[in-house]
Image (tube, rainbow, N blue to C red):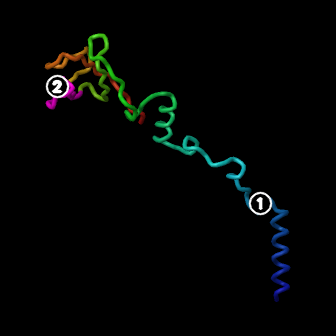
Amino acid sequence: MASRLLRACVVSTQRLKTCSALRPLPRTFATAGIPTDEEQATGLEKRTLQSLKHGKDPWSIKKPQTYAGTKDDPHIVPSVGTKRLVGCLCEEDNTAIIWFWLHEGDMQRCPSCGSHYKLVHHELPH
């Protein structure tokens, strides 16, 4: 009985070696390596990684750029709509926030300190 099982195992392993459809696939990680995040990302994650690669900031992850707040260099406020509520800390040590609506179009000034703000349309990556 044991000899029959042994012969059957030998025959089946010889068939596997000759039949290409039944051969096990070679391990791909050994030849290609582990894929990077960019290679295996899909959907929204892939778009986000591509836009970060091109220097864009799709989710406002990076530190915002500082502006002088003058007429020549206004504070840029990104928005997906036509208006946005903005809070201005007029002085560095001030504890009160001056809130005002900023509308798309021309620059607007803070009613308290006079800093200039401009609303810029911002497209989300999805």
* Residue named by callout 1: 21
Quarter-wise, where is residue 96 in the image? Answer: top left
Q: Please state the extent of the stretch shown in magenta in the rendering.
A: 84-98
Residue 66 in the image: state x and y as whole percent: 33, 23
Give the numbered dot on residue 37. Answer: none
Q: Amino acid at mark 2?
A: Phe
Residue 63 in the image: state x and y as whole percent: 37, 31
Taking the spot 19% from the left edge, 24% from the top edge, the residue there is 91
Quarter of the C terminus within the rendering:
top left
Q: In terms of sequence position, does the residue under pointer 2 or pointer 1 come before the other?
A: 1
Taking the spot 55% from the left edge, 44% from the top edge, the residue there is 37
The front one of 108 and 70 is: 70
Quarter of the N terminus within the rendering:
bottom right
* Residue named by callout 2: 100
Taking the spot 22% from the left edge, 17% from the top edge, the residue there is 115
Q: Secondary structure at mark 2?
A: strand
Residue 6 is inside the magenta segment: no
Quarter-wise, where is residue 98 in the image? Answer: top left
Compared with residue 81, is residue 36 higher up or lower down, i.e. above or below? Answer: below
